[in-house]
Amino acid sequence: MQAVTSTQFTRKEIDAERTPENSAQQSIIALSRSEYEKVTRKFTPLQNVGVAPFAPLVVQSGEVVELPQRAIANYNDGSTKELAVVWNEDEVLALETATKGTYTIHGTIDQPQYASPLVRGRADPWVFKGEDSYYYFTATYPMQSYDDPHGHDRIILRRATTVEGLATAEEIVVWDEDNTKNSFRWIWAPEIHYINGEWVIFFTASAEKSNVWGIRPHIITCNRGDKNPMNPECWEVEASRIRPVSVDNTSFSNFSLDMTHFVNNGVHYVVWAQIMGQSSLAIASVDAMDLSQLTSPYTLLTKPEYAWEWDKEWVNEAAAVIHKNDKIYLVFSASSVNHTYCVGLLYADKDSDLLDPNSWTKVRYPILSSEDLPVEQNGPGHNSFTVDKYGNPIIIFHARNPSEDPTGGGLYDAGRHAFVKGVNFAFDGTPILYLTPEQELDPKYKAVSIEVTIK
């Protein structure tokens, strides 16, 4: 599609000058100037165009100098992002004994760097930062091949004081299907949360032995002993199946998985994927004091509609929520588990009825796909959100390296790895997931300075 402003060109000029060379078809839409500017602002790739200068500081001799800890990065759509600044330590220390005069302090904007991948062989990664300031990591424990007798049979957990530290943190098994009587292999997509003062893990497990199609959402609680989530003895052995309300005969009646949890305006919600014709996403409210019990019938949020949502299968799954200003942004994964896997987006006003499907808007294109990433990150999807050490949002997602996995992958291999990227927000609040570190911060703006005058 080619958009032009209605006041600039005649039809003859459009046909002669504005039609792309060798095009076979065209669709021309007349726009007002303001509409045209909004479209270009929305769909021009986001790029850092500068960093706001720091205002000079004036302090009295002997006073403690408090330098700003954040720089404001500016982008071509008018949006901004606060990035952390690390000041030259020697110059800062020299200020403590400096006499009156004006001094220039130099600094560098810090963009956290992560191992790539962060954790190998771990699909469906979930990272949660607890009130104890630890980062907790869990993910699907893989099979190595189709006939691997192990894998997809346990829940693993790592803990570290930084996201970077998760790469080398000890990994423990907190739950294994061998020890239970009512939940079986095909353990997928665990998520750890801290809700109402307790650690819980939502996960998918089969309700029938040796039946991959019998999977349903389950939950376990860390409610024994000293309730230390890194102690397997503190977790329930027998998981609870998530239960629908009595009038809902659809929820969890067949293949269902990938449950996530979020709170909005004091109400607890869960979102999960279920076969409803195709793999679709549903939402319901849940009892805050009994997270295994829904308190509303399900609402269908999204089903596959567009070409990017299907390859061999029609799939919407793997929801995760991020809040920004007055909106709830719900990202999900779509298409087959191969290079076509990608991330879509729904959003709603936080004060709307989230159980009303009309409250939600679906973006008609993916917001993260293979084309947005380096060649060694193929088929991005199934992700979680947390914050980095400076409090800025990040996304942890899985992707596969095609050079390691020339067959194109699938569920029965360990070729999906956990990666980390920064999250930006466009001028209208929409999450932007595709930025490279250089797009987030042009290297020429990385060095900053501030003048400090001592009187």
Image (cartoon, rainbow, N blue to C red):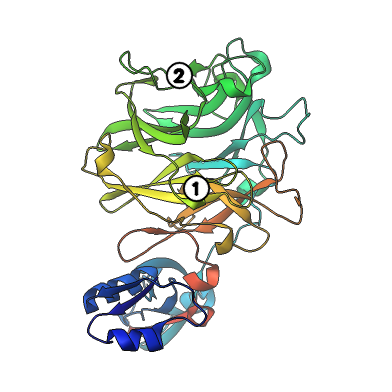
| In the foreground, 353 or 136 | 353
Circle 2 crowding by C-alpha within 10 Å: few under 14, some 14–19, many from 20: some
Name the residue rendered at 48%, 70% in the picture: 440
Using the numbered discs, state the Cα–Cα distance from disc 2 to disc 1 in whole angstroms. 24 Å
The foreground one among 427 and 193 is: 427
Residue type (three-letter) at the residue carrying disc 1: Glu
The residue identified by callout 1 is 309
Q: Position of residue 121 (x, y in %)?
A: 69, 43
Is the C-beta separation of discs 2 and 1 under 8 Å? Answer: no
Which residue sits at x=62%, y=41%?
123
Can you tell which quarter of the image residue 424 is in?
Answer: bottom left
Q: Is residue 208 in view from this perspective?
A: yes
What residue did someone put label 2 on? 253
Classify residue 99 as left or right of residue 255: left
Can you say which quadrant of the picture contains the N terminus?
bottom left
x, y percent for residue 16: 39, 88
Note whether residue 135 is visible. no
Q: Residue at x 35, y 87 (%)?
A: 100
Tell which of 408 and 157 is nearer to you: 408
Q: Upstream in the sequence, badge 2 or badge 1?
A: 2
Please determine whether, in this image, residue 410 is positioned above or below residue 285. below
Q: Residues within 10 Å of mark 1 (few under 14, many from 20)?
A: many
Q: Report the residue that reaches farthest toward the top.
A: 181
Q: Quadrant of the C terminus?
A: bottom left
Residue 452 location, quadrant: bottom left
163 up-or-down from 36: above or below:
above
Q: Is residue 364 left or right of residue 135?
A: left
Give coordinates of residue 89: x percent, y percent.
Answer: 52, 73
Looking at numbered disc 2 in the image, what kind of residue is underneath it?
Answer: Ser
Residue 251 lies, with reference to residue 406, above or below; the image says above
